Image (cartoon, helix red, strand yellow):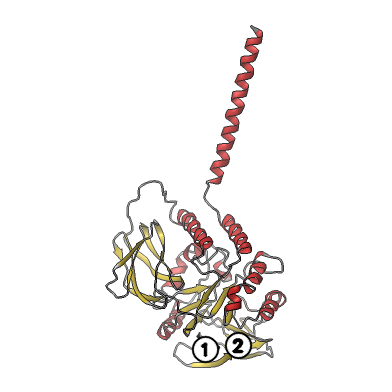
Amino acid sequence: MKKIIFALLVLAIAAFMVVGCNSESDSDSDDDDAPITDDDLNDDVDDDDQDDDDVDDDVDDDVNDDVDDDLNDDLNDDVNDDADDDIPHSCNATEIVREPYLLGVTQSTIRIHWGTNLLGDSIVEYGLTEALGNRVDCDQWGMIHRCVVPNLETETQYYYRVESCGLQSAIYSFQSAPHRDTPFTVGVWGDNRSDPASHQMVADAMAEAVPDIAINVGDIVGDGWVASQYNEQYFDPAAALLPNTPTYISIGNHEGESVYYYSLFTFPGVSGYYSFTYGNTLFIALNTNRLYIHGSPQYQWFKQTLESQAATDAEWIVVFAHHPAWSEGWDSPGYEGEILMRFTLVPLFEQYGVDLFLCGHTHDYERGEKNGVTHMISGGGGSALDSFQQDFDFIEVYESRYHFVNLTFAGDTLSIEAIDPDGTVFDEHLLTH
């Protein structure tokens, strides 16, 4: 009898251990299904960027689309009051609080974002005329809405509007990316934070110039962790520009790597550095808030991008970031640019034939050429202007005034015009190959 009781006791203990192991396994599975964090996303994207032979692929890239989808889900959960995708939704939005704005555009797709005051669905209507006629239901629920419109014809003008819970925006327009050899224009501005009235003057003047795409070199808000500032200091003052002009941003220090920034702007990857090809030009955005020293993920990615087939095929290579390597202006003595950049990124510019480096941080306009690379600061987008502090021999033009820059790419020529809000062209320069 004692042997039987002992055997039964052994079997009971074994069964208990099996149940415990299964419970631990279930717990691990739950961890795998947990929402993706910003750190997880950054680690994944950095790894993908290192291994991806086609690092310059446009926003259609499958990896980037997957990352964007993950980011949409994660940040909609965080920013949109943790909406549960597994239960039926009621369409609660009563107002479009952020008019549509255009991000990555390719020859066949465009990314459109907008915002509502409460949860709602995400629909884009578009077509070749204002009658529209085509519809994309983006199967995405939230207050921050993100849609990709597919199957566009190359170099074609489209009209569109967005819809959430029956609320419709005005009708706007965009043009899909051009053929390689078609001339195009790029509007550049930056450091628009903190003074919406001055920013609006600059943005209105840019909109009148009708650039094909636009680049902002960062510091779009004073404090990236204050959600209301994105409308107050960026979207509202630039309302004449953003719904019709695909815009790319190099994140500034004032954005603070905040969750709000990364929820509102989904460029390829989520670390703030990315690349895209438009026309005959490769554009590379860097995040100079993050490490870019030798051996860092961003340095390795940047070098790989400069060695890519897209860089070889491009007529022009343009890099844009927030911080400058050299700066003549500042609001007080002591800042002369990023000295570390001169020993890390600038040698790569010069080695791999970067034509133009666009940046901001200093609130002025500066242009000069050093070792074959044109360095340009366009930080007069609205913030209080800086004053002259020191002289660098290679910087040819210094102007402390509000402005934007108009770049025209046409085959082997690149023309540069710096323009103030009154339309006065105060600097002109021509680059040729």
Q: Which of marks 2 and 1 is nearer the N terminus?
A: 2
Residue 286 lies left or right of residue 66; in this view the side is: right
User: Could you tell me which quadrant the N terminus lies in?
Assistant: top right
The residue most toward the top is 1
Q: Type of residue at label 1?
A: Ala
Q: Type of residue at label 2?
A: Arg
Dot 1 corresponds to which residue? 418
Q: Which mark is residue 367?
A: 2
Q: Can residue 336 be seen in this view?
A: no
Q: Which of 157 and 416 is in front in this view?
A: 157
In the structure shown, which secondary structural element does the residue marked by tag 2 occupy?
Answer: strand
The residue most toward the left is 131
Q: Residue 355 carries which label?
A: none
Residue 329 lies left or right of residue 99; in this view the side is: right
User: Could you tell me which quadrant the C terminus lies in?
Assistant: bottom right
> Residue 36, relative to residue 29: is it above or below?
below
Q: Residue at x 61, y 15 (%)?
A: 8
Q: Which of 409 and 121 is in front in this view?
A: 409
Pointer 2 local density, CA inside 10 Å: few below 14, some 14–19, many at least 20: many
